[in-house]
Amino acid sequence: MSYKCSRCKRDVELDEYGGVRCPYCGHRVLLKERARDIKEVDVK
Amino acid sequence: MSAEFDVEFIERDDRSARFLVRGLTPAFANGIRRAMIADVPTLSIDTVRFIENSSVMFDEMIALRLGLIPLTTPLADYEIGETVTVALDVEGPATAYSGDLTTSDGLVEPADKNIPIIKLNQGQRLEFEADAVLDRGKEHAKHQGGVSVGYRHLQRVEVIGDRGEFDEEEPHILRGVIETEDGELVATDEFDNDLTNRYPGKEVSVTDVPGAFVFHVETDGSLSVEELVDRAAESIGDRAAELKDAVSV
């Protein structure tokens, strides 16, 4: 899962046991990045 | 029902018209109205492929907005289910408008260019490709070409005498189109929908003219009024022919 630290804006990879914390600045608020693939939406 | 209809336009605009049709039954008038709403197909965005959306709104919300943008529809060139590709790429700070949409067919374009889709801030971007499909209003309201379609009986107004000297003059509100004793057609908004403004001090009788209906038709810009009415009548004819074929087999 790729996230972005909300303080230092660096990309962060989270693993299962590392906990939710930026490895660069220690900030605990991480934002999930939007997937890069194309998303198809039906207009109904 | 008489074999021939008598049609007279009272008001005519790019997107709206008011016209009188004589020789109709109420059932047929309602059939035409319903056909204009539900049976005449228009193009509308149906599937959106988001490449990038860093705006503050979800993809689904933007997609719903896109579906409601009316697109001009060359009905002669498309069959039901056929698609046109539409694309947009806008980067903030800017507002993405319907006019920013580009299409694969020059005849298909947004009917209004100034419909805001989303306001984008610095660093936000909206990029997508979409398929606009031709379908009918009965499948989804976004395919309705006629947005305000209705009819009223033509009303004949006759002066039957003078109002009594001591009678109170109360407003006599009437909406639509009236036919005067001379056969003149007058829209009621010309006299502020109040018959006492047109016939001050007179006593009048108002009666429905049998078989005469005043239609008010407004389109969303995807089709002209004439095309909408033509296609509605055609669809009723087609269905009657289908029924005839089914019965005769």
Image (cartoon, coloured by chain):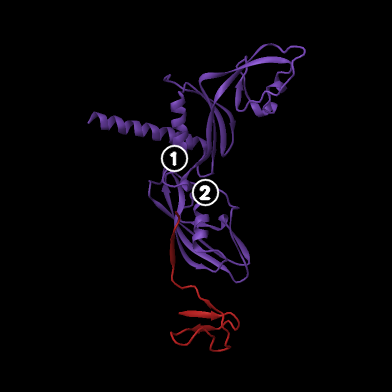
Chain colours: A red, B purple
Is residue B65 placed above or below B9 in the rendered structure? below
Residue B59 at x, y percent in the picture: 50, 63
Helix, strand or loop at mark 2: loop
Which of the numbered marks, if any, corresponds to residue A13? none
| Residue that label 1 marks | B38
Under mark 1, the amino acid is Ala
Residue lying furthest bottom: A24
Residue drawn 49% across the image and 60% down it: B60
Q: Chain of mark 1?
A: B
Q: Answer whether residue B81 is visible to the viewer in this image.
A: yes
Looking at the rendered image, the quarter that the C terminus of chain B falls into is top left
Name the residue nearer the viewer: A27 or B81. A27
Q: Nearer the viewer, residue B26 or B90?
A: B26
Callout 1 secondary element: helix
Report the residue at 52% width, 39% height from top.
Answer: B224
Q: CA distance from mark 1 to mark 2?
A: 15 Å
Q: Which residue is mark 2?
A: B70
Q: Where is the N terminus of chain B found, in terms of image quarters?
A: top left
Residue situated furthest left in the rendering: B249
Tag 2 or tag 1, which sits nearer the N-term?
A: 1
Say which quarter of the image contains residue B18.
Answer: top right
Residue B40 coordinates in the image, percent (x, y): 44, 40
Give how far across and how far down residue B126 sits, in percent: 54, 65
Residue B189 versus residue B66 in the image, above or below: above
Residue B73 seen in this snapshot? no
In which chain is the residue bearing label 2? Answer: B
| Amino acid of disc 2 | Pro
